[in-house]
Amino acid sequence: MSSLLTFPKGGVHPPASKGLTANLAIEVMPVPDELEIILGQHIGAPCTPTVTPKDAVLEGGLIGEVTKGLGVPLHAPVTGTIKGFGMSGHPMRVSAPSITIQTDTEALPVQYSRCDWQKLSKEELLAKVHAAGVIGIGGAGFPSHVKLSPPPDNPVDTLILNGAECEPYITADHRQMLERAQEIVEGALVILKILGIKKCFIGIENNKPDAIKTMTEAAAAASTPEHTVVVQPLQVKYPQGSEKQLIQAITGRKVPGFALPSAVGVVVHNVSTARAIYDAVVLSKPLYEKVMTISGKGIKRPANLLVKVGTKVSDIVEYLGGVTPELAKIVMGGPMMGFAVSSLDIPVTKTTSSVLFLAEDEIDTTPHSQCIRCGWCLNACPMGLEPKEIALYVEAGRPQDTGQFGVFECFECGCCAYVCPAKRPLVQFIRLAKMKAKR
Amino acid sequence: MWKVSISPHVKSGESVEKIMWTVVACLVPPLVLSVFIFGIQTLLITAVSVASCVAVEAATQKAMGRKITITDGSAVITGMLIAFVIPPGVSPLLPILGAVMAIAIGKHLLGGIGYNIFNPALLARAFLLATFPVAMTSAWLPPLSDLAIFSYLGTPIDAIATATPLAVLKTQGLAVFSDQFGVGANLYTNFFLGWRPGSIGETSGLLIVLGGLYLLYRGYITWHIPVSVIGTIALLSWCFGGESLFSGDPLLAVLSGGALLGAFFMANDYVTCPTTKTSQLIYGVGVGALTVLIRLKGGYPEGICYAILLMNPVSPVLDGFFKPKRFAPLQGGGK
């Protein structure tokens, strides 16, 4: 095992809390009676439905397409009938247009078989990734085919698969690396072929030694003189799963502000996205289901679940035996960057990695007090920004003057607010600054 | 119904209260020792000082319509530090006046915790030194030799007052100083343990350094300010503190006066010191240099109080100049 790398500046060490689910194998959740598929699953324009109410759809069949701008098609997660169009709850946007599908409970799951992808050209592979609706499922939801077509003036030489999974609680990538290692590595080979490059690193944090071992074996078995896939163990530090921090940890290169990783010759995909690319290219299976972690002291039975996109959180709760009386907060996504929701009536999207049911002793909602200028936020910020100054300017009604402190480089990892002893909602101040400064 | 709030949903277990009360705990050992050195009245003065700081904080916050935050421990620290920097033989009325100056004027009229420019405890000391110069420069007590901690209680100060080592050194020279406080290892040991005249909490280098090291271990302070302050005082005192160049005693300079208390518990006060590492180093050098300048050339034997007060308003300037190193900034500053 090579030495442990990490990014040099900032970062925090939240308690890992992964023990609740790290040893639980991925479990297939039975298909619920009804799914609500949100039309805007990714960054860019939402899909336009290609079906009308009462249409019968097949599992994997097309139900939405993007006609303009960036985007990928949307597929039916189950065989059934289109019940109608409506609005669904959404963790970030409050509500979003969606398609409701009534599941045909009699229908058998569709079987997919391997194709010989090695014979396909780069363009054909790329077209399959696009057609399968693959987006970055680690969180941001960037259409994968766009990432796989870097601008020609930025030659790419390195692929990095992100298996850091630095957010506390979440073990979805961890379990997939253990249970689907070969598929992830084959996905990496597909990406290497599309990009026309030879070198792939898989960055995994050292708190997942079993995943490092399994993935190293799979990578060694798949590496050839033409293509090398190498597992790079990383120190445990949040936010190592951030693209810029991961690239710096593994290659030492720094992605400039507002630039894409291809500016420094790197393309980054999540390990789960690599698996989705494997599904898309090798099995011709569209992306319509999702491995996610359901955890926290507020749920009866924590689990790693394979669920259909469009499954409502309420169905998951019911399947896992309900919530416990300690439940104090529900978070979609990780505890550092996820969104607290007020309702269980929210469907899972392609980018939902986890739903956390947190008890009072797992959260901190202490009211905030005045900044005591301890400077801890400056030390915690991996981007070298000044969260305390941004917050003071926002409080003073001058959000337009926060650009000098780098407000637009902030990716809202929350390290500053995590360490703040005065419990100041620094991420919220920064979001306000961004919103108001843009106006 | 459950809670909805902004990310991050987990937080480190640290809080302002925890930091402040830890600092208070670190100040307790020097206080206890001072009872054995100067007698029980140090405890009385400290209690009056703490109580009046807390009371003034509550009263000011009530008067200004602000939330009362006396439980956060910051007023308690100020109270302890005011007591720590005044002579052990003063009247208990002095810390009460100091508390008004520190908390009502120095802290809350300037915006409350986080917004005050000057270290409140040192502001109080400077105020008391200006208004009650005789009491503040003559109420020094010689250390008790036989642990008779009640011996000075109720005795008129004039009968027993002494002078601090720095004052003796400044006005009477090295020969008298050596006569009075000894030489060599014996001298260093007495000074390191605290067996010398001085302010209530400043005499025991050992306990102050131990408290500072504990704060370092907890991550509440960093080495930058204490090391640069102490380093500068030692270096400049060695260069210019003796009869000729490079003949000063750096160890004695660090152990006498309030150098260690200032370096570990005053100069690195979060609110009034700079926040970036480079600024902190420059700030510490500034505090150290001004301390030595005042000690050697100024009108007072002790200098660290004014040195810190003079550097306090420089903090925001330094922070504005030495920014954290950005990851990879946008072109044009992101405007």
Image: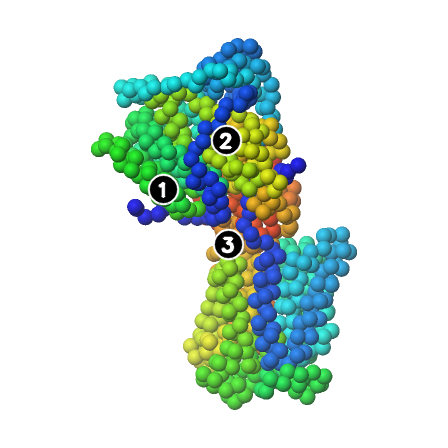
Chain letter of the residue carrying label 1: A
Q: Residue at x 62, y 81 (%)?
A: B38
Chain letter of the residue carrying label 3: B
Residue A300 picture location, percent across and down: 55, 38
Chain letter of the residue carrying label 2: A
Q: Nearer the viewer, mark 3 or mark 2?
A: 2
Q: For marks 2 and 1, give the CA distance.
A: 24 Å
Badge 2 and badge 1 both on one subunit: yes
Badge 1 and badge 3 both on one subunit: no
Q: Residue at x 67, y 58 (%)?
A: B71
Task: Quarter of the image for the C terminus of chain A: give it.
Answer: top right
At label 3, counting other C-alpha atoms closer than 10 Å, the crowd grade (few under 14, some 14-19, many 20 or more) is: many
**Disc 2, disc 1: CB below 8 Å?**
no
Relative horizontal placement of residue B196, taking residue A263 as reference (left or right): right
Q: For marks 3 and 2, give the CA distance.
A: 38 Å
Disc 2, SS: loop
Q: Amino acid at mark 1?
A: Asp
Badge 3 and badge 2 both on one subunit: no
Residue A352: image tag: 2
Q: For marks 1 and 3, give the CA distance.
A: 40 Å
Residue under label 1 = A210
Residue under label 3 = B276
Front residue of A159 and B242: A159
Q: Residue at x 51, y 81 (%)?
A: B190
Residue B104 picture location, percent across and down: 72, 61
